[in-house]
Image: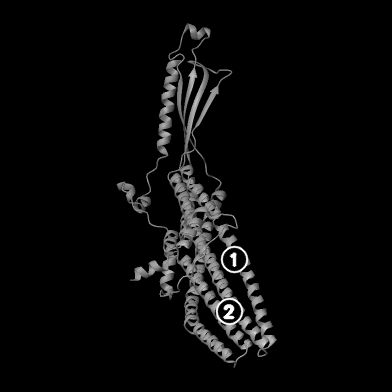
Amino acid sequence: MIERFRSLTMILALLMVAASGGAQEAPDRNEQLDNPAAETGQATTPTPLPSEEVVAAIEDATLRIFAEEVLERNPRLARAQAIAAAAAQRAPQVSALPDPMVGLTLFLLPPQTRVGPQQAAVGLSQRFPWFGKLRLREQAALLNAAAAHALVEAVRLELITEAQRLYYELSFLDDQGRIVREDRATLQHYEQLAQARYASGVGLGQAVIKIQAEITRADTRLLEIDERRLTLVASLNALRDLPARTPVPSGNLPIAEPLEEEIEALRSVALVRRPELAAADARIESAATRIDLAKKDYKPDFTVGLNYGFVGRRDDAAGEAFPPEGNGDDVLSLSGAINLPIWREKLAAGVEEFIQSRLAAEEEKRAIVARIEGGLGDLSSRLPLLFDQLRLYDYVLTAQAEQSLLSAESAYAAGTLSSLDLLDAERVLLNVRIAAARTRADHAIAIARLEGEIAAPLTSLSREEK
């Protein structure tokens, strides 16, 4: 009996080695071409991600640190990363052979054979999918994982763009609040002058009331700015998963630069770098791979089995009197089977499913390209207008409003203008300064959106052109 078990153990070990060896398929030549270091064993320098380049190009240190915190702590990004990590674990599962089956049969009523009664049987079987099925399953899973990782990068770029937008909105509110507070201090000075003139009988009481109303209006505007600032701070903290009232420092709005890149150049960069397009391409390739896999379902799978039967010695009178040759020898058998893919409608439906999946992925890519072109078209037309408008505010309207206010103050001091005329000149300057700050913020936000659309900082494009 000991010899029997030794023989059985050796046979089972050999079959398990053969089954595990069958799961190892030749590496895909395309993967070797994509990663030449795989053959040489040499490490290659990783290429920076688009989001890393955009963050590194941010000149405002406070904003750059804030963007890094968002990428480190944002729950939405963490979820996308977990989904991508889960997708990466799919390939090792689908590329492995099915689990081998081990069976044990005990004969409660042993059948008698010429060489003795059959007492028990042990069987081991392994199913082998048709040639190429495991490779195609692994390739489709790897492509889906690549699409998931590309979408992680897309989320990063969206978060960076949104973080910059909120940061610039907060910077505008701080600029607006500073302008309004300076205006309020000026109004208080005008109120004192108006009250002095009214007390001396030169001015009108209406001017004092009008100026006081403007001071109250400034106080109301400051309260509105504080309220809006709290909302922006809460949104900014939500991006980095911190309590809503966590302080968020703001900075200065960046200096506006003219957009020098042409729309076609920006479009070319976007079509190469946008991670959504990479994800769409991966999904298209995955669907095409699954079409090939579905077509291979028309081919049968193989099952190979090995069975070992335990046979006892004959104990009947004839067997004991005349023992047969091989009395009590065990039985070893080899079996094979294939499945029969005869349900053609089911198989055809599987092929058609992935044909439609590939069509859906191709249409999704078209939609992404259309959104990119629409966003670039809007931004490439708005940015020059915003820049020209900002130059108009900075070099013309602001100077004119300041000169008009100086003239009004001189005329007011000379007594040729009333307090109401002086107030009107001050209102014009206030509106021009706020409008200039708003335009500067809109220009900075548009630049951030443009960098998100092309998945690259504009400064890097400028360096490449030089």
Q: Disc count in the image? A: 2
Q: Residues within 10 Å of mark 2 (few under 14, many from 20)?
A: some
Q: Quadrant of residue 209?
A: bottom right
Cα–Cα gap, marks 1 and 2: 24 Å
Q: Residues within 10 Å of mark 1 (few under 14, many from 20)?
A: some
Pointer 2 residue: 186
Give me the residue at 46% from left, 53% from top: 146
x and y, in percent, of residue 444 in the image: 49, 71
Q: Nearer the viewer, residue 459 or 46?
A: 459
Mark 1 / mark 2, whichever is N-terminal: 2
Pointer 1 residue: 229
Q: Secondary structure at mark 1?
A: helix
Give me the residue at 41% from left, 75% from top: 260
**Residue 95, above or below 53:** above
Can residue 351 be seen at all in this image of the molecule? no
x and y, in percent, of residue 157 in the image: 49, 61
Q: Quadrant of residue 22?
A: top left
**Residue 70, above or below 386:** above
Q: Secondary structure at mark 2?
A: helix
Q: Nearer the viewer, residue 173 or 191?
A: 191
